[in-house]
């Protein structure tokens, strides 16, 4: 069965998409996809444990009547593992190729065609095809940076969550100098026109730039709190105190301590900096932020939804 999982992943449109869009090697991507195989083989992952722990702590009953939404479930390996662990979960994904692959993986895992269609549904997290107060919990793993309108997405999350329902988000924190889709050092919040110069120096395709938007812990926290979520926990996988240290590591040849804003606003300088960084062995840490928050039991006033993305 494990070989069937691996064959499906390696031969999938999704595998080819990541190679073509972000310039990843098939060898590196194969190793990454082995992580998906491991989840399906062992049914173990910290995100599964997180749901079950929150279920026990907050009485979400996700193995009984409560339902979890995996918002932007990708190829669905984690969703399948969660389902096999007894969690009532539904995965929504916008990309048709990923939805097809997730249903194929579900079939290999032993689910019927009818079951696989009930687990995975094609749709946008900005317009979730479920009624208000439906889900006990929403998980959103490495997705929020891909949506076109974060505010609309978070409004949808609070709309479809039950009062007292939990939301867990994790995503790349672009305050740190690393781009996790291309897997290269990257200047924080670099203008996309300058990012094209940077990517050319790293021999990476430019098409991936339209696939993600810059997000950070403070950015998402501000939106979540503004629409009415109650914050429970917010952390980064690398201590925030290391942001300047990591940036300085990338700017190792910046002996004159030139402002990073100056360096990342001049095409000529960004080109020279990219050449230097590519030659060096510096590799900043891939850093994500994680936020756990809760929809209050009380009514959320409509006036709170007048927020606009900054």
Image (cartoon, rainbow, N blue to C red):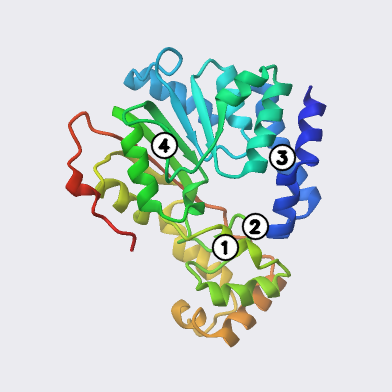
Q: Would you call the spot at circle 1 few (<14 residues within 10 Å), some (14-19), or many (20 or more)?
A: few
Which SS class for mark 1? helix
Q: Which of the numbered marks, if any, corresponds to residue 210?
A: 1
CB under 8 Å between discs 4 and 2: no
**Residue at 34% across, 60% down:** 309
Q: CA distance from mark 4 to mark 3?
A: 23 Å
CB under 8 Å between discs 3 and 1: no
**Residue of label 3:** 33
Q: Would you call the spot at circle 4 few (<14 residues within 10 Å), some (14-19), or many (20 or more)?
A: many
Q: CA distance from mark 4 to mark 1?
A: 25 Å
**Residue of label 2:** 183
Q: CA distance from mark 2 to mark 3?
A: 15 Å
Judge left or right: residue 230 versus residue 68: left
| N-terminal label among 2 and 3 | 3
- Which image quarter is the N terminus in? top right
Q: CA distance from mark 3 to mark 1?
A: 23 Å
CB under 8 Å between discs 4 and 3: no
Q: Is residue 72 above or below residue 264?
A: above
Of 28 and 273, the residue lying toward us? 28
Q: Position of residue 78 (x, y in %)?
A: 59, 30
Figure quadrant of residue 158: top left
In front of the other: label 3 or label 1? 1
Q: CA distance from mark 1 to mark 2?
A: 16 Å
**Residue at 24% across, 42% down:** 228
**Residue at 35% across, 21% down:** 57
| N-terminal label among 4 and 2 | 4
| N-terminal label among 1 and 2 | 2
- Which image quarter is the C terminus in? bottom left
């Amino acid at each position: 069965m494990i070989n069937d999982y691996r064959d499906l992943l390696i031969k999938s449109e999704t595998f080819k998409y990541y190679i073509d869009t972000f310039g990843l090697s098939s060898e590196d991507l194969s190793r990454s996809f082995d992580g998906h195989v491991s989840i399906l083989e062992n049914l173990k992952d910290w995100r599964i444990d997180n749901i079950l722990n929150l279920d026990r702590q907050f009485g979400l009953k996700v193995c009984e009547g409560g339902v979890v939404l995996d918002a932007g479930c990708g190829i669905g390996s984690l969703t399948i593992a969660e389902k096999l662990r007894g969690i009532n979960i539904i995965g929504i994904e916008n990309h048709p190729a990923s939805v097809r692959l997730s249903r194929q993986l579900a079939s290999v895992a032993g689910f019927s065609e009818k079951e696989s269609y009930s687990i995975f549904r094609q749709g946008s997290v900005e317009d979730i095809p479920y009624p208000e107060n439906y889900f006990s919990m929403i998980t959103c793993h490495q997705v929020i940076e891909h949506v076109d309108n974060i505010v609309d997405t978070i409004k949808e999350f609070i709309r479809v969550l039950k009062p007292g329902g939990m939301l867990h988000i994790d995503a790349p924190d672009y305050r740190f100098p690393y781009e996790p889709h291309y897997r290269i050092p990257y200047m924080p919040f670099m203008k996309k026109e300058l990012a094209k110069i940077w990517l050319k120096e790293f021999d990476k395709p430019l098409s991936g730039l339209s696939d993600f938007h810059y997000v950070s812990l403070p950015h998402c926290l501000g939106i979540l709190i503004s629409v009415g979520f109650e914050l429970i926990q917010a952390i980064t996988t690398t201590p925030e105190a290391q942001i300047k240290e990591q940036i300085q590591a990338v700017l190792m040849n910046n002996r004159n301590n030139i402002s990073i804003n100056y360096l990342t606003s001049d095409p000529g300088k960004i080109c020279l900096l990219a050449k230097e960084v590519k030659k060096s062995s510096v590799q900043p840490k891939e850093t994500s932020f994680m936020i756990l928050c809760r929809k209050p039991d009380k009514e959320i006033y409509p006036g709170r939804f007048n927020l606009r993305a900054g």
